[in-house]
Amino acid sequence: MAYVAVKGGERAIDAAHAWLAEARRGDPAVADLSLPQIENQLGRAVDRVMAEGSLRDPELAALAIKQAQGDLVEAAFLLRAYRTTLPRFAEALPIDTEAMAVRRRVSAIFKDLPGGQVLGPTYDYTHRLLDFALADAPPSAPVAEPDGARMGRVHDILGQEGLMEADADSGVVPGDLTREPLAFPAARDVRLQALARGDEGFLLALGYSTQRGYSSTHPFAGEIRMGDVSVEIEPAELGFAIDIADITVTECQMVNQFKGSKTAPPQFTRGYGLVFGHSERKAMAMALVDRAMRAAELGEDVTAPAQDVEFVLYHSDNVEATGFVEHLKLPHYVDFQSELEAVRRMRAAALAREPAEIAS
Amino acid sequence: MNGYNFAYLDEQTKRMIRRALLKAVAIPGHQVPFGSREMPLPYGWGTGGIQVTASVLGAKDVLKVIDQGADDTTNAVSIRRFFARTAGVRTTTHTAEATVIQTRHRIPETPLRPDQIIVYQVPQPEPLWRLVPSRAETRRMHALADYGVMHVRLYEDVARFGQVAISYDYPVMVNERYLMAPSPIPAFDNPKMHMMAALQLFGAGREKRIYAVPPYTAVRSLDFEDHPFRPSRAPHSCGLCGASDAYLDEVVTNDRGTRLFVCSDTDYCEARRAGVAA
């Protein structure tokens, strides 16, 4: 009976998986991609997957990208599902981005500043012309080693004059969205965690919307820096910190105008972005959205999507979003059947009431 | 399975979920936030139900998984395999044999017993979501039992269509206190929830909520005195087993609009056919 064919079954799933594996491999005459190739040559993709997958492990991220055929949201999902099974043995101390081994650092608000402007490996001034030479041979670049000196942050320069809001350590242990469900009002620690894990495209669009009138935060890119920082933990039994890894991060400090309120004089406020790897787009968008979400705290009107904390936090996670959007592929014939009956019933009732009007 | 704990989740996580379940059972129909984990299956595909099942499952349990009433729909197969692989439990398609039944969108036709648990997969635990999108606001409304907006919505349907136009995920009042989303089961199934002998657990993974209806609890579908709740089904008998009391799927059998109506509960249908044949 034809009806049986619409039922899935184990054989269909196995066959689908086998087909998927074949499609993933592609033409066997072409060399198989190695994980070091992905890790080294598709670094921005690896960085994005680590950021949205909330797991800093370039090798596993490369594996996830390979397994997902380059679908970065799927790759982030693979990494998340692995991450959730890992035990926690320690909490890291806050990273010190002033001590970053800086590969890139730019400020849009001071022409020059201590530590200088460091252009670094950026696409900013490339002309977007397809480089056909790249199809064959890679170019080489001169390499400058970081000098290891501490590089002060731009907001501290403004802070010396009292022009920048103070940024004190609240002493509160930051929340963790991956362990405790989101609750509202959500504090800034949890908001920043959600943004750091959030979908780059979603944050980009929201940040962009604040620049077009859907709330305005008057942003200036105070500084953007990218480089390596060390991660330290302080095991209780040792009593001092030990360095466990160096990781690459991108940090963005937006400087935003603030007119002042009853309790605070006019000064600059900040929006903050920090992501794994090299991703200025994400860090900048994150900083814009972080500042927009501070509207209520700073006594500004909450009128735009980017300022609505609940809206932003509930919709920024692409693993959640893709799951729910794509779940529409699952069978819904029971619900659809109930809708069919309801529509037929309502049509019958409507036609019985006013047959001429509706039929015409 | 090597490298993973029994039923995938670690024991700490299961304990956290069981605590949420206990609270949920203690306050029937109340949504309890829980630290939903990222599962190896996508959000929206049953991660809430899977986490609840993983937390209540023991080695001696017999698991049945259905989607749209059927054991052989692809996602039901996938979830059943997941537990067969990670917990090694016995699985079944027979409602009467199962001790734990995970379901999406249906309640089996065969009445459940006190020694059974039914776990619903829930896409949207908040019954008020279409009316009030903010969860901070709906939480306050539940606290105050402020459900006027839902009654107004039902009244508007009656005024416009002469009847309530909700056909699935039809809102229910649990224990006369909490308004609850029964998950997207057809309204036809709602009466089965009322005074059910089995424990009913609801898991919403993406929304990070768990709720429950303990055995023998009153579950009332919202209605009006002059417009009583009417569970509806296609006005036909099953084309395979002849059942006239079961919920039916409508199957299009050719391009001339010919329809075949068959039981959505495949186990029920097969058992009836076996009984008829015997």
Image (cartoon, helix red, strand yellow):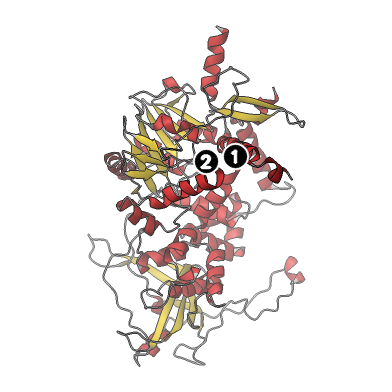
Give the SS element for disc 2: loop
Q: Is residue B205 above or below residue A112?
A: above
Q: Are marks 2 and 1 in contact (CB under 8 Å)?
A: yes
Q: Is residue B140 above or below residue B4?
A: below
Residue linked to disc 1: A346
Q: Residues within 10 Å of mark 2 (few under 14, many from 20)?
A: many
Q: Quadrant of the N terminus of chain A?
A: top right
Q: Residue at x 33, y 24 (%)?
A: B115
Residue A294, position as x, y percentages in the image: 40, 74
Asked whether residue A180 is in view, the answer is: no
Q: Amino acid at mark 1?
A: Met
Q: Nearer the viewer, residue B6 or A203?
A: A203
Q: Quadrant of residue B247?
A: top right
| Residue highlighted by disc 2 | B163
Q: On what subunit does the disc labeled 1 rest?
A: A
SS of the residue under disc 1: helix
Q: Badge 1, how many Cα within 10 Å: few under 14, some, many 20+?
A: some
* Image quadrant where residue B39 sits: top left
